[in-house]
Amino acid sequence: MKASSSNHGPLRPASRAVRRFVLAYRRMVAGALAALAVVVGISALEPADPATSAVVVAAHDLSSGTDLSDDDLEVRHVPSEAVASNAYTAVDDVAGESLSGPVRRGEAITDMRVIGTDLLAGYPPGSTLATVRIADTHSLWGVEAGTYIDVVGVDVDGNRSGKILADDAQVVAIPESADDSRAGSSGVSVVVCVPEDAAVGLAEAATRMQLGVIVSADAGDSHR
């Protein structure tokens, strides 16, 4: 019995020391464990960063007809769900193209913003493009790609009264800005999307009339 007591005797002081340490610092240990649990819980509740995608945007304000260069463009990463359809993702894919309308700094460049070979994509069946020369450049104030306009003709000889030649025509591109130094007394060219018969009428009227545009509050309602 004495031998057994001598074998376990050295362990008892160490056991008592551990118990005293735990009892003395139990509140500190419990607090540390509680704090760790809170940190782990908050980390688990934090939402994951949203997925992003690269998008080419205008590096500064750009006017209609601009031939895009690397200095005009930059790539930004935006939430994937906010990316516009058919947006360009690399500068090389769009550099060298021409803008169909003005673009603001930071605006994404899409296929609808450049003058391409398939300009009628997305327009109603039977549509065609007509280029009209607008004599009164002031009537183009505020007009840009996507704007719906009425094209009016005025007889230069004064033998006939003015009339609407094409109503609710959507502007596809303005190759020359209304304040472009190239736009003189001859006016500014505007590309519009109209039915084929209206395009023929506009071409015929251009030989004997001065053309202008009207933008009304109801313009484009039939397309919405």
Image (cartoon, rainbow, N blue to C red):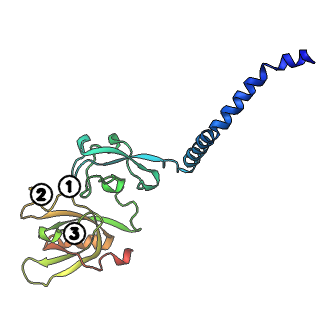
Q: Residues within 10 Å of mark 1 (few under 14, many from 20)?
A: some
Horizontal and vertical percent position of residue 68: 25, 46
Q: What's the mark number on residue 180?
A: 2
Inter-mark Cα distance, 3 to 2:
24 Å
**Residue 67 on image: x %, y %:** 22, 47
- Residue that appears at 12% across and 84% down: 160
For disc 1, the marked residue is 63
The image shows residue 56 at horizontal and vertical percentages of 34, 47
| View extreme (right): residue | 1
Q: Residues within 10 Å of mark 3 (few under 14, many from 20)?
A: some
Instruction: Estimate the x, y position of residue 206 in percent, counting from the top left.
Output: 17, 70
45 on left or right of 144 = right
Q: Residues within 10 Å of mark 2 (few under 14, many from 20)?
A: few
Residue situated furthest top in the rendering:
3
Callout 2, which amino acid?
Asp
Please give the name of the residue rendered at 26% of the width and 40% of the height, measured from the top-left corner. Answer: 70
The circle on residue 203 is 3
